[in-house]
Image (cartoon, grey):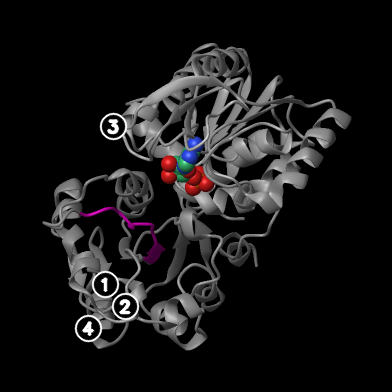
Amino acid sequence: MRTIDDINFKGKKALIRVDFNVPLNEKYEITDDTRIKAAVPTIKKILDDGGSAILMSHLGRPKGGPEEKFSLKHLVKELSDRFGKEVKFASDCVGSEAESKAAELKEGEILLLENLRFHNEETKGDEAFAKKLSVLGDIYVNDAFGTAHRAHASTSIVAQFFEEKVSGYVMSAELENAEKVLNNPERPFTAIMGGAKISDKILIIEKLLDKVDNLIIGGGMSYTFSKAKGGKIGNSLLEEDKMDLSLELVEKAKAKGVNLILPLDTVEADDFSNDANKKVVKSGEIDDNWEGLDIGPDTIKLFAETVAKSKTVLWNGPMGVFEFPAFAVGTEGIAEAVVQATENGGFSLIGGGDSASAINNLGYGDKVSYVSTGGGALLEYMEGKELPGVKALEN
Ligand code: AMP
């Protein structure tokens, strides 16, 4: 796959698929600019070469037509401040306004297009719509790893209309780091899987059993394992139809010599709320009508010891309901252990989504090796699936 470093953009217009799907508050202010920051080096390289940048992205989940709260115009000021120049805006991502504004762009200038998903054709991967987008630029750059698992018009279909198509720095870094963990991990290699459901992560867990030395399972999904082993889990999260599967995973891990580590204790609560009464109990001994919302102190110690002495760490999914500060202790403890492993010279990759927010909220974003910007895309890539956004750049 070619990258933007293989191209001199002098005098060229780059049509760049970025991931500017950032959270906005009710005043339309950006509350987390991680994704914008991530795209800056790619845009800068193109401008520094003497090219111009046409930025296209989705924002939120509009129903197929314009919606004020999902307008990308709310990002214009932030982008203009960041690049120290006026960023132009086209109020529709295709059509005459976008075309004339793109045609008028001069060296070093930036044009932001309105939300791609104001057109249903975007998510349908419509070819005619993709063609309309393609006329805006000379070279296609995809830097939106977070949507690379979707065969949308702007993430994959559009590429066929370009002779020159390359990955941006975010896309390249994501693929490189995922590859490093999958194909070349320094050992011991520990994966930490958490979050709500086994069903969402089963494929990656199975894949990881062939790769890792230690597989740590925490969070909501661990209670299905506990129940399957005959434990009492009260009202904790349970995927009844995955109980057999969880026992199979335990057997598979044994057969492959993987150290599968499950929680020793849990913090149970009498209500699903931050103010609930809570108690630490052993795993499999949760009281009736109570539910496990976090891993307990013995588990944090056990998990943290394993993580801290690992040379490669992959983390996806929180250890409890970390949105409630009272039940974020386990997730924080694991985050600290991942930082420790990194300080000890290990390589740590934080899968996107909730584990990425947890690391960033704790201010540890710079203390781990890499925080992925793509949750679903990273998981699918690691499961061994071909990502349409990546494949489109390879043809
Ligand atoms: P996922 O998207 O699968 O990574 O799951 C993340 C979600 O799992 C977060 O919103 C957590 O609140 C939730 N979660 C983690 N542990 C538990 C638990 N013990 N009980 C209920 N939800 C949980």
Where is mark 1, residue-wise? 114
**Relative horizontal placement of residue 225, taking residue 139 as reference (left or right):** right
Three-letter code, disc 2: Phe
- Whether residue 383 is visible, yes or no, is no
The residue stretch that appears in magenta: 14-24
**Is 115 rendered above or below residue 322?**
below
Q: Quadrant of the N terminus?
A: bottom right
Amino acid marked by disc 1: Glu
Instruction: Give the Cα separation between the discs numbered 1 and 3.
Output: 42 Å
Name the residue at 26% across, 62% down.
107
Nearer to us of marks 2 and 3 is 3
At 35% from the left edge and 27% from the top edge, which residue is drawn? 277
Q: Earlier in the sequence, mark 2 or mark 3?
A: 2
Between 383 and 174, the one nearer to me in the picture: 383
- The residue identified by callout 4 is 97
Q: Tag 4's secondary structure?
A: helix
Tell me the distance, in whole angstroms, between the alpha carbons under discs 2 and 4. 15 Å
Is tag 1's residue or tag 3's residue first in the polypeptide sequence? 1
Is any atom of residue 90 visible in this view? yes
Single out the mark in the foreground, 2 or 4. 2
Amino acid type for the residue under numbered disc 3: Asp
Residue 161 drawn at (x, y percent)? 52, 78
State the residue position of label 3: 275
What type is the residue that disc 4 sits on? Glu
Q: Which circle's residue, 2 or 4, is located before the other in the chain?
A: 4
Q: Is residue 329 magenta?
A: no
Total tally of numbered discs in the picture: 4
Prevailing SS of the magenta stretch: loop
Query: Percent from the top left, x then y, of residue 216?
Result: 64, 28
